[in-house]
Amino acid sequence: MAEQVHTLPIDNLAPDEVASPVMIYTPRTLSWGQLISKKAIRANVILRSTIVPDYLAIYKAHTLGLQGGELTKPIPSEELHIPTENVIGFHLMPPYEEEPDYDPDEINRKMEPVTVFVGPFFFHGHMRMSTQTDLGTFLGVTKTIFASLYDVDIVHMSNTSMKPIHVPMCQIRRTYALFSNRLG
């Protein structure tokens, strides 16, 4: 009997699939690895698409526990399934990036500087909104589950040895994060 060889999906992508390096924040973990998606759906907005999966499957993954004040050693796994309902933050892993999801020449829009608290992380960035509104009003009328944040610097609140992560765009679950006018 021949030995069965297991291959990861990222080693056998279909012609209409792409693997993208992502970072995913939950209340207790930070995970990163390769997300497989259809080429027609940009990875950086998959959580705002009409076909959001119940689980985000990432391959060649690493996970850090975020309990307590100290970062732990990453735990590797070949395949990791994260319940989408637990995702607070999501972005492509630098230096990978995709085109913005908006028209920069659109009139009556502004980039509002904000700080978003995601577990033990500060996400210092900008939210795109009408020039006629402010952060509180925007959050009150926006009905999307995930809000986009742009030009973002991510820092750990207490672990200064962790280098900041800069991403052009990320997705934040509005109901699990805290939003503030820009801090510091």
Image (cartoon, rainbow, N blue to C red):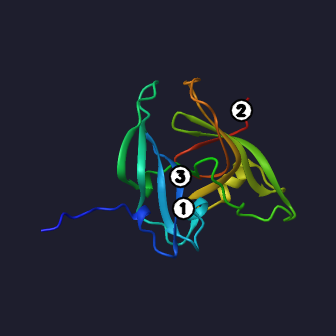
Query: Which residue shows up at 55% across the image and 24% down it?
Result: 159
The C terminus is located in which quarter? top right
Residue 18: x and y, percent? 53, 66
Q: Which mark is residue 22?
A: 3
Nearest the camera: 105 or 162? 162
Does residue 15 appear left or right of residue 44 in this picture? left
The reply to whether the C-beta atoms of the residues labelled 2 and 1 are less than 8 Å apart is no
Amino acid type shown at disc 1: Leu
Amino acid type shown at disc 2: Leu
Residue 63: x and y, percent? 41, 41
At label 3, counting other C-alpha atoms closer than 10 Å, the crowd grade (few under 14, some 14-19, many 20 or more) is: many
**Residue 93 seen anywhere in this rendered image of the structure:** yes
Q: CA distance from mark 2 to mark 3?
A: 26 Å
Mark sitting earlier along the chain (3/1): 3
Residue 66 occupies quadrant = top left
Mark sitting earlier along the chain (2/3): 3
Mark sitting earlier along the chain (2/1): 1
Element class at badge 1: helix
Asked if 96 appears above or below 108 in the picture, the reply is above
The reply to whether the C-beta atoms of the residues labelled 2 and 3 are less than 8 Å apart is no
Q: CA distance from mark 3 to mark 1?
A: 12 Å
Q: Which residue is mark 2?
A: 183
